[in-house]
Amino acid sequence: MQAILGSGGNFLISREGEKQIFNIRRTLEKHLISLPVQFYDNQNRGKLTSRVINDSTKQI
């Protein structure tokens, strides 16, 4: 019985963490879309994408 409850609790905690990461990434996406085109002239797309993914995951 404890194993079932423990697994259920872990699932819920993991699910909540994923929701938080999704919300952070959605907020970042909205911000990046609102930036002027000139911002992207000086940015490497791969580095920017990697930074968004890695940094948003580390926040949790």
Image (cartoon, rainbow, N blue to C red):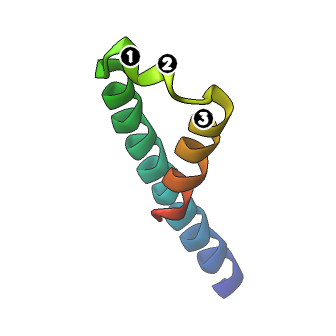
In the picture, the disc for residue 53 is none
Which percent across, then down, holds residue 46?
68, 32
Q: Quadrant of residue 1?
A: bottom right
Q: Residue 9 in the image: x percent, y percent? A: 54, 72
- Nearer to us in this view, 39 or 24: 39
Q: Provide the residue designation for mark 1.
A: 38
Measuring from the top left, give residue 56's x and y in whole percent. Answer: 49, 52
Amino acid type of the residue that numbered disc 1 sits on in the rendered structure: Gln
Residue visible at 48% across and 50% down in the picture = 21
Q: Is 34 located above or below residue 5 in the figure?
A: above
Label 3 or label 1, whichever lies nearer to me, is: 1
In the image, is 31 to the left or to the right of 4?
Answer: left
Q: Amino acid at mark 2?
A: Asp
Which dot marks residue 41?
2
Please give left or right for residue 28 compared with residue 10 in the image. left
Q: Residues within 10 Å of mark 1 (few under 14, many from 20)?
A: few
In the image, is residue 8 above or below residue 55? below
In the displayed structure, does residue 28 sit left or right of residue 12?
left
Q: Residues within 10 Å of mark 2 (few under 14, many from 20)?
A: few
Say which mark, if any, is on residue 49: 3
**Circle 3: residue type:** Thr
Disc 2 versus disc 1: distance between alpha carbons? 5 Å
Q: Residue furthest front?
A: 42
| Tags 3 and 1 touching, CB below 8 Å | no
Horizontal and vertical percent for residue 12?
51, 62
Point out the residue furthest to the bottom here: 2
